Amino acid sequence: MKKLRLDDEKYIKEFLIKNKKSLINLGRTYTNKEIAESIDHTILKPEAKPDDIINICNEAIENKFASVCVNSCYAPLVTSLLDGSSVKTCVVVGFPLGAMSTAAKVAETNDAIEFGANEIDMVINVGMLKQEEYKYVYNDIKAVSDVAHEMNAICKVIIETSLLNDVEKVKACLISKAAKADFVKTSTGFNGGGATVEDISLMKLVVENKLKVKASGGVRTREDAINMLNAGANRIGASAGVKIIANQISNEGGY
């Protein structure tokens, strides 16, 4: 396959037509353990209380989820509650708009990791991507990724697929790969839409095995989770993790 380039829009469009659904394999099944180990148990709503955070940490430990994903003010609490377990502390940065300055994102990243975060989920500057200010987007991601790596944390890049066309999704993934992020991630869950098998397959195809892929937004059932994993997701961001494992349907919106 010819190497994808940001400035080769014609080839990107040809690539999309030819390859978009090529990785989807909806036939495989997964055990509860495999699904649980992929879940970032998430609570990002603005009205979330400390008691809510305590509850999802207990659920994450009981179900052996991959991480608990919270806003940065809760990093110290989550880190203390998860101490001694296999569950990681995941903190969102520049959330949910991505329109903060790079310096603000770096400061939030540094603060979160100092308080115990193992994983950082940052939001790209969507407006800059759509304006084709690719250097700005690259520098924004790289600044956060570099700080995370220097402090032994991983960096996931939320590209906000619901606001992008397919060409922009490819370019966001290419920039994230160039900036040496660890994951690309679909959504914040705050801008409509959410993860789809088509987007996960596309993102996986673009980043190849250089980065991992996280599906987030609208994953509410066991079937949803399995479909995302089959499409190429390595992680699933969900507030419905317990119901997913129990094979129950969640009516929760957003994450």
Image: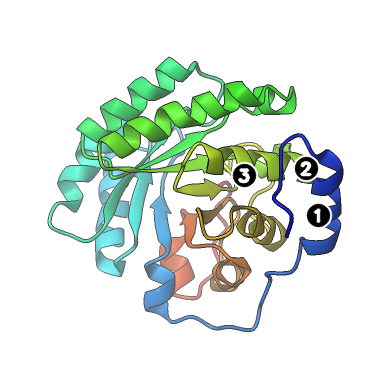
Give residue 223's quadrant in the image: bottom right
Residue corresponding to mark 2 = 167
Residue at 77 percent across and 46 percent down: it is: 166
Residue 242 shown left or right of residue 116 in the figure? right
The residue depicted at 37 percent of the width and 41 percent of the height is 70
140 lies left or right of 144? right
Question: At which x and y percent is residue 135?
Answer: 61, 23
Q: Do the numbered discs 2 and 1 sit on residues whose CB atoms are within 8 Å?
A: yes
Kind of element beneath mark 1 = helix
Residue 120 lies in quadrant: top left
State the quadrant of the N terminus: bottom right
Nearest the eye: 3 or 159: 3
Q: Which residue is under mark 3?
A: 173
Given the current orientation, which residue lies at the most extreme front position?
Answer: 2
Amino acid type indicated by mark 2: Val
Whole-percent x and y of residue 151? Answer: 25, 36
Residue with the mark numbered 1: 16
Give the x, y percent position of residue 9.
82, 39
* Mark 3 neighbour class, 10 Å CA radius: few under 14, some 14 to 19, many 20 or more: many
**Residue 162 visible:** no
SS state under label 3 = helix
For the residues labelled 2 and 1, the Cα–Cα distance comes to 8 Å
Look at label 1 and name its amino acid: Leu
In space, the residues marked 3 and 2 are separated at their CA atoms by: 10 Å
Whether residue 202 can be seen here: yes
**Between 151 and 221, the one nearer to me in the picture:** 151
Location of residue 81 in the rendering, given as x and y in whole percent from the top left corner: 18, 49
What residue sits 54% from the left and 72% below the top? 222
183 left or right of 168 in image:
left
118 or 246: nearer the eye?
118
